[in-house]
Image: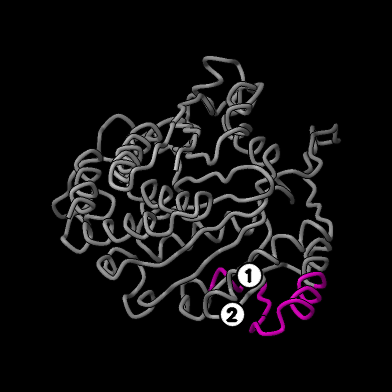
């Protein structure tokens, strides 16, 4: 295979963890005879500094022509001024919209070697295997918003907007995934309060009944789901929900594994390339210290190989290597529970060593 991959290292620890993932990609290329042309591009706060915008036109153009996109992380306190003209996160929202990346896949499955890393009891998290499918280009993040005068000063508003097509396409992806797993699909909404959620509930029910009658389908209110995630996470298989609910619930779900440094994600759509990233942020407090956990980005690379390039053998080999490293007891600081730890580069090297065996 000979393909181009757009690499957006981003801000904070993004460049550090992305470097380790690219070392793994190079090892896979050598092992299987592939050629991956990796093009590094500015995006996020660094792009604001160099181009005055978080997503330069040149970056977007290269991404459109690439087979897939690997992203590190964006943002940081340097660009957090609420009065700033633009922010790094605006680039992330724009690339999702421009490339039609409407479905975000976030697997949450704790490693058996790290059950103790979760703040939850082992008997609660053990055996959990959830795939969250989050709608990514609609809802509050993309609805009409603004500020207007108010007798008290100002009034701010954000609008949650969805249409039938937007709901159907993401629920269909979730249902297809559930059909390949344990055939259980849960839709999360707030239909007792929000009109947009009522649309989600009716459209989802009709779609599943018509196209996926073989699935076990249920609906859970978002506040109840927040409780169930920490009391009975094993009961869920594939969970589909709207943009903001998915953002919050998946960050909560990351604590089932014990660290955001272990969780990858894939943002998919048509016809554009998929975008793959760790779910953690730029962690500016540890940037440059060489202690960031690169495993989520390395696992995001495995998702890239699987979903965009259809290289299942290569993807599974990376996941197996990560599992071996954890089984052998190697830990970065975030998952070491106060015990011995190694740095970012060292952890990347352990994965490379495991790939070579």
Q: Earlier in the sequence, mark 2 or mark 1?
A: 1
Q: In terms of depth relative to the viewer, which is nearer, 240 or 31?
A: 31
Left or right of residue 254, residue 149 in this image:
right
Residue 223 coordinates in the image, percent (x, y): 62, 69
Q: Is residue 215 inside the magenta stretch?
A: yes
Q: In percent of the image, x 56 and y 64: which residue is there?
A: 132
The residue wearing badge 2 is 184
Q: In terms of depth relative to the viewer, which is nearer, 356 or 227?
A: 356
Residue 212 coordinates in the image, percent (x, y): 71, 78
Q: In percent of the image, x 28 and y 50: which residue is there?
A: 334
Residue 350 coordinates in the image, percent (x, y): 19, 48
In the image, residue 17 above or below residue 121: above
Left or right of residue 146, residue 172 in this image:
left
> Magenta residues, as a range?
202-227
Q: Using a 10 Å C-alpha cutoff, classify the residue at mark 1 as few (fewer than 14 neighbours), some (14 to 19) or many (20 or more).
A: some
**Outermost residue, left direction?**
340
Rounded to the nearest angstrom, the CA distance separating label 2 from label 1 is 11 Å
Q: In percent of the image, x 65 and y 64: which residue is there?
A: 173
Q: Do callouts 2 and 1 mark residues in contact (Cβ within 8 Å)?
A: no
The quarter holding residue 281 reads top left
The residue wearing badge 1 is 176
Left or right of residue 137, residue 27 in this image:
left
The quarter holding residue 62 reads top right
């Amino acid at each position: 295979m000979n393909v181009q991959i757009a690499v957006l290292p981003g801000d904070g620890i993004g460049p550090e963890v992305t470097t380790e993932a690219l070392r793994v990609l190079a090892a896979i290329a050598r092992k299987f005879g592939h050629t991956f042309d990796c093009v590094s591009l500015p995006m996020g706060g660094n792009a604001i500094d160099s181009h005055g915008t978080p997503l330069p036109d040149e970056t977007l153009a290269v991404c459109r022509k690439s087979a897939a996109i690997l992203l590190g992380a964006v943002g940081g306190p340097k660009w957090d001024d609420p009065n700033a003209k633009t922010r790094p996160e605006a680039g992330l929202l724009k690339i999702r919209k421009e490339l039609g990346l409407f479905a975000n896949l976030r697997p949450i499955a704790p490693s058996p070697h790290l059950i103790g890393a979760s703040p939850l009891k082992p008997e609660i998290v053990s055996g959990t295997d959830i795939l969250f499918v989050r709608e990514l280009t609609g809802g509050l993040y993309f609805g009409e918003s603004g500020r207007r005068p108010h007798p008290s000063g100002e009034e701010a508003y954000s609008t949650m907007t969805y249409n039938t097509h937007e709901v159907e396409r993401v629920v269909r992806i979730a249902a297809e995934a559930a059909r390949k797993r344990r055939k259980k699909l849960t839709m999360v909404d707030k239909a007792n309060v929000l009109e947009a959620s009522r649309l989600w509930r009716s459209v989802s029910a009709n779609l599943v009944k018509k196209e996926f009658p073989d699935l076990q389908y249920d609906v859970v209110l978002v506040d109840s789901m927040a409780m169930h995630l920490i009391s009975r996470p094993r009961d869920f298989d594939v969970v589909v929900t709207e943009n903001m609910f998915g953002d919050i619930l998946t960050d909560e779900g990351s604590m089932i594994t014990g660290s955001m440094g272990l969780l990858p994600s894939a943002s998919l759509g048509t016809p554009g390339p998929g975008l793959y990233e760790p779910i953690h942020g730029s962690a500016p407090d540890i940037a440059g210290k060489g202690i960031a956990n690169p495993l989520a980005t390395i696992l995001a690379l495995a998702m890239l190989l699987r979903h965009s390039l259809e290289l299942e053998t290569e993807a599974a080999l990376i996941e197996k290597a990560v599992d071996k490293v954890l089984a052998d007891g190697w830990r970065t600081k975030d998952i070491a529970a106060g015990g011995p730890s190694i740095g970012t580069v060292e952890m990347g090297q352990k994965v490379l060593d495991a790939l070579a065996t």
